[in-house]
Amino acid sequence: MTSRVLVVGAGSIGLFVGGKLGVAGAHVTFVGRRRMLDEVTEFGLRLTDLDGGDDALPSARCHVATEPDDVGSADLVLVTVKSAATADAVRELTGKIRPGTVVLSLQNGIGNDTVIREILPHCVVLAGMVMFNVVHHEGGRFHRGTEGGLAVQDDPGLAPFLGVFEQAGLALRRHADLRPVQWAKLLLNLNNPINALSGRPLREELGDRNYRRCLALAQREALAVMQRARITPARLTPLPPKLVTMLLPVPDGVFRRVFGRVLAVDPMARSSMADDLALGRKTEISWLCGEIVGLGAMVGMPTPVNQRLIELIVAAEQGDRRTWTGAELLDELRAADAAQH
């Protein structure tokens, strides 16, 4: 039986994941901004990836809406809006969605599933994580520019959808407890503000030792706070998180030899935060570095590096669109750290 999927938040991630499910045979409806929906209506979707994959979903099979109207027929709802928009977007589903419908949060940060569950208490609300980056090109093309899949909280309610996700090349990696994975992904996402402030593609930014030193500062601070809070992040990379922070500052040549796979990303790939700044939108900084600052306040530990990254991104949101060199940003973060300690 064809799965009916509703994607709430038709941005790059929502269109890529929903589009792949559509190619695999699901009936997918995309809810989002008119600008993106018009592009999909005109061109359909072309879904490519760094491994050579190239799929197309014609416009006739791209069902779009600016408001979630036909919600009652949905078997599965994917929430892919930015974290700040979660509550407002999900409230649009109240009174329309069937009790027991599976609602999967595929969002950055910690706790979006809790927000959704409070608004939709009669649904099966599950946390999920998208572990890859998607680049939007004009003409309805969305390109997976990094490695990774979909990690989700396991639940029997997912059983009817496992086949279509696997057919789509997005087999769900199920976890009894997703929180360690979410915290580990958050550690990786601490590079998002650094990438946004650098003004460079991910490959170029991560290839620069000084930017990696910035990331190491942010991650070491985050790991210290997590340890105080007795949070153990999952291991998402070949090396454990603590060892990664020790190796990030190595010279560029050594980094390329040891972490070659990290740099095996699409040359045009940038963080979603960089995309948000380029489009004049508010970022998810409060759900990334803000989580670390909030956790630090809870356990009584200062977090000056992540706090300074928040301040720089907020300034950029407000129009101070300075491009930081690696050396400049490193000096800024080190100064913030030294002032606190």
Image: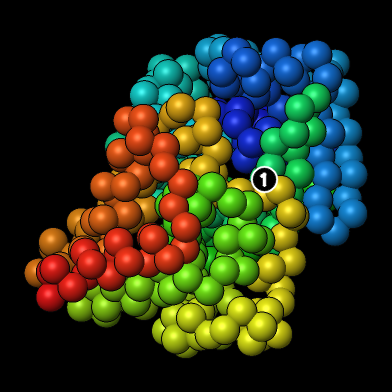
129 displayed left or right of 162:
left
- For the N terminus, give its image quadrant: top right
Give the residue type at disc 1: Val
Q: Residue at x 75, y 38 (%)?
A: 142
Q: Is residue 5 visible?
A: yes
Q: How is the image coloured?
A: rainbow
Q: Is residue 127 left or right of residue 46?
A: left
Direction from residue 47 to residue 132 in the image, left or right: left
Q: Which residue is mark 1?
A: 134
Near-viewer residue (338 or 146): 338
17 w.r.t. 231: above or below: above
Q: How many marks?
A: 1
Residue 145 position (above or below residue 229) = above
Q: Residue furthest left?
A: 300
Which secondary structure lies at badge 1?
A: strand
**On screen, residue 281 above or below 143:** above
Label 1, residues with CA under 10 Å away: few <14, some 14-19, many ≥20: many
Residue 253 falls in which quadrant of the image?
bottom right
Residue 249 at x, y = what percent? 48, 81
Decide if residue 22 is in sight here: no
The residue under the point 81% across, 50% down is 49
- Give the residue drawn at x 75%, y 55%: 266
Q: Quadrant of residue 261?
A: bottom right
Residue 279: % across, % down: 52, 28
For the C terminus, the image quarter is: bottom left
Residue positioned 62% across, 15% down in the render: 35
Q: Considering depth in this image, is 236 or 290 the residue closer to the camera?
A: 290
Q: Nearer the viewer, residue 203 or 240?
A: 203
The spot of residue 146 in percent (x, y) is: 70, 58
Give x and y (percent) for residue 215. 43, 68
